[in-house]
Amino acid sequence: MTLPPFDRYYYYSKSVQSPEEDMAFLDQVYRDFHGRKSYPKSMREDFCAGFLNCCSWVKRGPQRVAFGVDLDPEPLEYGKKHYLSQLKPKEAERITLLEKNVLGTGLPKTDVTCALNFSYSIFKDRLTLKKYFKNVYRDLLPGGIFVVDAFGGLKCWEPNEDEISHNDHDPPFSYYWDQDSIDPLTHHARFYIHFKRKGEAKREKVFTYDWRLWTVPEIKDLMEEVGFRKVLTYWEGTTDDGDGDGNFQPTTKGEDCESWVSYIGGLK
């Protein structure tokens, strides 16, 4: 069988992203701050790459508008070709794409800003991350929220590689999350994503990430320093087998897990 050409953004979206669930979660966080009958209309996705989240956002209602911000033109063009083109015309016209630096000025004011998939971790010193958070706070509308995710756990302190098989896909493939290194004094870490399609050799280092592993208390402290008047931390529930159940709720206490993902939301 001849396999289709390898498309790294396609396999990334199938392995890493859950746009419908993520956008529903942003609504949940907004309601947690404002009440269950409240809902946001405008969303800005920073480090948006192919802006799948923006596409999902505008599908949630005819009054929803989305702004995708990214410095790299390649994934923006990919999203225009493969995702924006699949929307209804009325949906597509409610998305605005900006090839801009999130540390700059002139970005749109919105009800919600998000930086998901740990993308803000590219900022490896506190002053730069604080500048980014200040920019987000400045550009949020009154009562707006800012949501990021974070990850950690015992596995983050040693090199390791996880494989997730997607056997229901045609062709079947495996996704690998590879933590290559971490410096305990700086929390600077390097990660890779590899892929392997059935019948092919493993494709190494399809994506590379040179990040700082920020902790939840550091993120919360910075949000409060730049002016957010309330900050909530979300922790995932567990199934009877001890696995994550995908249900994130605000809490003040986590668990000592081997690996975990959390969300932090700030209210302007």
Image: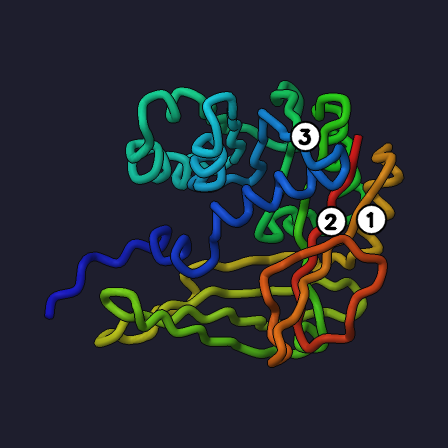
Helix, strand or loop for disc 1: helix
Identify the residue at horizontal 41%, vertical 53% (top origin): 13
Helix, strand or loop for disc 3: loop
Identify the residue at horizontal 65%, vertical 71% (top origin): 238
Task: Please state which amino acid type lies under the numbered disc 3.
Answer: Ser
Helix, strand or loop for disc 2: strand
Q: CA distance from mark 2 to mark 3?
A: 19 Å
Quick one: 97 or 232, which is closer to the camera? 232
Q: CA distance from mark 1 to mark 3?
A: 24 Å
Q: Pick whichever of labels 1 and 3 is earlier in the sequence.
A: 3
What residue would you read off at disc 3?
38
Task: Please state which amino acid type lies under the numbered disc 1.
Answer: Lys
Based on the displayed image, in which of its 4 quarters is residue 8 positioned?
A: bottom left
Based on the displayed image, in which of its 4 quarters is residue 197 positioned?
A: bottom left
Asked if labels 2 and 1 touch by Cβ distance under 8 angstroms, the answer is yes
Indicate which disc residue 220 carries: 1
Asked if labels 3 and 2 touch by Cβ distance under 8 angstroms, the answer is no
Indicate which disc residue 143 carries: none
Q: CA distance from mark 1 to mark 2?
A: 7 Å
Quick one: 124 or 143, which is closer to the camera? 143
Q: How many marks?
A: 3
Identify the residue at horizontal 87%, vertical 35% (top origin): 229
